[in-house]
Image: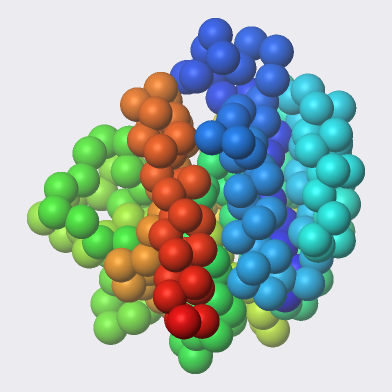
Amino acid sequence: MKVILLSAGQGKRLLPLTENQPKCALPLGDKTALEWQLESLAAAGASEVVVATGFQAGLVRQIVHRFKRLPVRIAHNPFYAHCDNLGTCWIVRHEMTDPFVLINGDTMFEPEVFRRLVASRDSHDITLVTNEKDDYDDDDMKVIVDGGTLRRVDKQLPIAEVDGESIGMIRFRGTGVGLFRTQLESMMLEESTLKRWYLSAIDLLARQGHVGTVSTAGHGWCEIDDHKDLDYASVTVPGWWQTGARLSADARR
């Protein structure tokens, strides 16, 4: 399965740490955030990865060149400073070939999360990974789901109607690839969409019944938006692999 990682942003909420490096290059233990993502994808069986770069692309390229467990390429967005990730998706739309998975550059995940998405038998040609928790805040990308079909995805949804949150990982296949690309091209005709997220395109497709969901089912994931998130990820993400190594050792005994 081909993967596109959206790693073009600087991560200004993490300043001053991101003054000279993008947040995907920040260390979490002994590896950068991007390296942990690539490790998870390699372990989960991804076939190739395209990393969409922007801010300090040279640093990201160095990380990519060091990684040897999986074919990884760069697709650069020279206009990253003038758009959000919807614009980056539009720039790299030529890489969106059937099938592929789109992942936010700050979404960290255990390999099993990706495996579940790829193996999902969801009947929709666009499938969003969701997570459930007890409380949701204003920054969560909230979702409304009806019988496995995504109805809405947006930060500004009525809490009483919310069924979960998007983790920033989504599979496209079949007609879903063309639907997404067409929606991107339509939205990018309007200058006002330059600062919008690609999930605003998914929200429009969800209202038409084109998007399904699959749950993380308790497997680990986290995102890195601010310093609190970074502190959590710095301990949690390496911990997933330490736990995995212990489980593998126990299974061999």
Q: Nearer the viewer, residue 185 or 169?
A: 169
Q: Is residue 233 visible?
A: yes
Is residue 117 visible in the rendered image? The answer is no
Above or below, 204 relative to 17: below
Q: Nearer the viewer, residue 61 or 242?
A: 242
Q: Quadrant of the N terminus?
A: bottom right
Residue situated in front as seen by the camera: 187 or 127: 127
In the rendered view, tell whether residue 165 sits above or below residue 20: below
Count of numbered badges drawn on the protein = 0
Q: Toward the viewer: 185 or 241?
A: 241
Q: Position of residue 34 (x, y in %)?
A: 66, 43
| Residue 214 % position (x, y) | 41, 75
Q: Is residue 93 left or right of residue 11?
A: right
Query: At which x and y percent is residue 190?
Result: 66, 39
Image-quadrant location for residue 164: bottom left
Instruction: Name the residue rendered at 43%, 75% in the picture.
Output: 250
